[in-house]
Image (cartoon, helix red, strand yellow):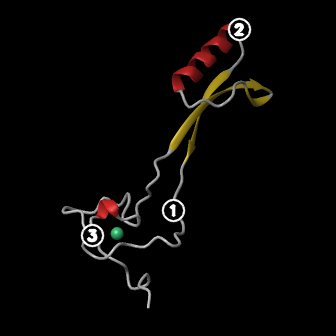
Amino acid sequence: MSAPYRPRHCWRVEILDEDWMPASGTHTDKAHAEALLEATANRRPGVQLRLIRETTTSHVEATRGVGHLPAGSNAEDCPACAGTNPPYPFLCPGPTPKETRL
Ligand SMILES: [Zn+2]
């Protein structure tokens, strides 16, 4: 099963003060964090700084109540097919035996 979530990134600046400490908040705009790094370096010459990229990934580990549409349905309309990019002609494979309600 492919993950429908893309990794998310944010950036922050850290400063070495015996240990690495936060020197900024987290920012989703890398250019902004780089500007903060530059500004901090200019304000505190001689200190050691680093730019940190944090990555958050999300994976579907369990799904409840969301099954496939009947076999042959348009996969783009199927919540269980979302993100799986099935081969052309993009048809939902239908419920697996486990999903079939008796
Ligand atoms: Zn489906």
Query: Residue 9: image x %, image y %?
Result: 54, 38
Foreground pick, 41 / 61: 61
Q: Earlier in the sequence, mark 3 or mark 1?
A: 1
Q: Which residue is mark 3?
A: 73
Q: Going 19% across and 61% down the picture, which residue do you hit?
A: 88
Gap in Å between the C-alphas at discs 2 and 3?
61 Å
Q: Does mark 3 have its CB less than 8 Å from ligand 1?
A: yes
72 shown above or below 7: below
User: Badges 3 and 1: C-beta atoms under 8 Å apart?
Assistant: no
Which quarter of the figure is the N terminus placed in? bottom left
Of helix, strand and loop, which one carries label 1? loop
Image position of 22 (left or right of 92): right
Q: Residue furthest left?
A: 89
Q: Nearer the viewer, mark 2 or mark 3?
A: 3
Which residue is tagged 2? Answer: 43
- Amino acid at pointer 3: Ser
- Residue 39: quarter of image: top right
Q: Is residue 41 left or right of residue 5?
A: right
Q: Mark 1 against mark 2, which lies toward the viewer?
A: 1
**Ligand 1: image quarter:** bottom left
Q: Give the CA separation, mark 3 to mark 1.
A: 23 Å
* Distance between the alpha carbons at the discs numbered 1 and 2: 44 Å
Query: Which quadrant, please, contains the C terminus?
Result: bottom left
Instruction: Where is residue 41? Give x, y as percent.
Output: 66, 13
Residue underneath mark 1: 60
